[in-house]
Image (cartoon, helix red, strand yellow):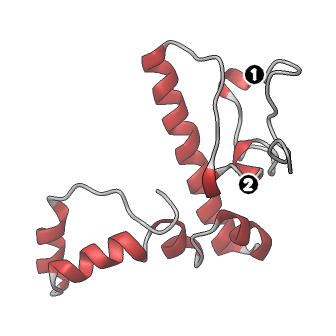
Amino acid sequence: MIGGRLAIDAAVVPDLARRLAVEPARLIESFNHEAGLLGMGGNGNPAELIAAGGERATRALELYCYRICKYIGAYLTVLGGCDGIVFCGGGGGDVFEPRGGGPPGWFVPPAGGKPPPGRARAAGPPAGK
């Protein structure tokens, strides 16, 4: 799940188009521009969803953050650990909640760990802001 797009197996498109009686191009347009946070929460910008609040936005953000944790866990398993995680762009560069400053349980550092003092921040404005 990302801001406005859906990550989906391409083989689903022709079958879903047939079942919904729509053109495959329309599905692809929807998957690329009307899904993800936008489709679930009504807005593809995490900061704006956080500000808007409400059940729909909260559910979308919870799934968004769950997916972040899931991917980090998968990468850490393959890598055998890491020294740091960098969030950038709208998914954490300027939005603090997904990287640790949000409601409890939104993003928990792997194994409940915290960055070493002076090496990284779990939440807060990016350097220079």
SS at circle 2: loop
Q: Which residue is mark 1?
A: 113
The amino acid at mark 1 is Gly
Tell me what residue is drawn at x 42 percent, y 19 percent.
Answer: 78
Where's residue 44, x and y in %? 57, 70
At horizontal 71% and vertical 35% (from top left) the residue drawn is 108
Say which of 50 and 128 sits in front.
128
SS class, disc 1: loop
Q: Nearer the viewer, residue 119 or 31?
A: 119
The correct choice, above or below, for 105 with respect to 51 in the image is above
Mark 2 and mark 1 in contact? Answer it, CB < 8 Å: no
Instruction: Assess disc 2: are there few (<14), some (14-19) or many (≥20) residues with their C-alpha within 10 Å of its C-alpha.
Output: some
Q: Residue furthest front?
A: 128
Real-space CA distance between mark 2 and mark 1, rounded to the nearest whole angstrom: 22 Å
Q: Mark 2 sits on what residue?
A: 94
**Residue at point 77% right, 50% down?**
96
Sooner in the amino-acid sequence: mark 2 or mark 1: 2
Residue 79 appears at what percent x and percent y? Answer: 47, 16
Residue kind at label 2, given as amino acid type = Asp
